[in-house]
Image: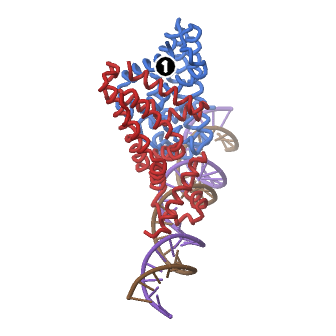
Chain colours: A blue, B red, C brown, D purple
Amino acid sequence: MSSAQADTKTRILDTTWKLLESGNKNVRMSDIAKAVGISRQALYLHYPNRADLLIATTRHIDSVKDIDGRLAESRAAKTGKDRLSAFIRAWVGYIPEIHGTSVALRAMQATDAEAAAAWNDRMQAMRHGCAAAVRAIKDDGLLLPHLTEDTATDLLWMILSVENWERLVRDCGWLQADYEATIQTLAHKALLG
Amino acid sequence: MSSAQADTKTRILDTTWKLLESGNKNVRMSDIAKAVGISRQALYLHYPNRADLLIATTRHIDSVKDIDGRLAESRAAKTGKDRLSAFIRAWVGYIPEIHGTSVALRAMQATDAEAAAAWNDRMQAMRHGCAAAVRAIKDDGLLLPHLTEDTATDLLWMILSVENWERLVRDCGWLQADYEATIQTLAHKALLG
DNA sequence: TGTCAACTTTACATCGTGTCAAGCGGCTCG
DNA sequence: CGAGCCGCTTGACACGATGTAAAGTTGACA
């Protein structure tokens, strides 16, 4: 793999990312090719199909934005409560970064099994963070008694969904800060005594 | 409009409904035509395009399932709290009925402006119910002080979204009854002191 | 000089939506 | 009885997007 190819590959990912985040729905392979400055067919030399390109783009964003590192910070929290707050802060700050890509990937879920699997995979990773926070709360003995670890994780997972962010921030015009504060409160009320 | 035509029209709607609710993603015009027992072209004689057919199907479901009547019951509640409970119960019971159609309509949002508008319209109607419940709570002086009527409505609207139902019931395998109980609690905690 | 890799150009297959036009059987109305 | 209309069929086709195939160009490097 020569450096020229690697350059083109990352240029493709950066361009795809930019196009998706620009809010432009329906980004076509030809749009991406044009924006990168290569032919549509050259795109297929690097990524076999649209789903693969979108998936690679999310992974690219993850590595550039260092989502793993950000979520890792929440692991350092002393109490379960702090851990929950830190996890929510990290995740909620990440949502706007991946929103455009998320929309595109979810739109393909209906027609493309691979795209659906990729999105599920990302969401399962986020769910693990929810599960860890719930466990820390339970270890502190603060989890509401009527909740099992699983149901609490499901509930937190639901509260933190990208779709909920979209509803409040994009559809209702909330400021990111208001969204975060409200979701923090809601999650704490939902799980803690 | 002869009765034969009306028969075919409703047969189309019933069949579309059944196909969508059968969980079969990607219901094509040809699938519907075949299931109804008419030619694909005959479909276009009744509904000019797929979006219109899906929209007509949701309206058909609404009238068969009498969503208006169900929501009207919540208006009879004496207190704001009761009204909130009744509204949630009515809406949450309705979600499973429209879920298949909802998925199809939302999948078209990206490509079809009319479908997006139709879905938005349905959701705005639901939002009015949220607003009414919030107002009743506020009139009782029970709305959490840091919430405005608008933000409280947005929040309730988010909590009651079809997407959240999908996450817990479809993705996490919750029973409808557990989902309803949890959402009731969550909504009450989110809005009331 | 020859070869290889990256890319281009052109053309084509496929799939689903939506359009167009001609025809057909049965029903009604004058 | 016959004219005309309605609901439907059949068959063909355009379009837009994805993805495939094949032959040609360009530049670097041994």
Asked which secondary structure carries label 1, the reply is helix
B142 relative to B15, above or below? above
- Label 1 sits on residue: A190
* A53 and B37: which is toward the camera: B37
Q: In the rendered view, does A165 fall on the left or right side of A143? A: left
Residue A119 seen? no
Q: Chain of mark 1?
A: A
**To which quarter of the image does residue B170 belong?**
top right
Q: In the rendered view, does B71 fall on the left or right side of D7? A: left
- Residue A61 image point, x, y percent: 51, 27
Classify 10 Å Cα crowding around label 1: few (below 14), some (14-19), many (20 and above). Answer: many
The quadrant the N terminus of chain A occupies is: top right
Residue B138 seen? yes
Going by the numbered disc 1, the residue's amino acid type is Ala
- Residue A2 image point, x, y percent: 61, 31
- Residue B111 image point, x, y percent: 46, 48
Q: Most extreme residue toward the top, as rendered? A: A78
B168 relative to A181, above or below? below
Q: Residue at x 46, y 60 (%)?
A: B47
Q: Residue at x 56, y 55 (%)?
A: B28
Q: Residue at x 52, y 34 (%)?
A: B165
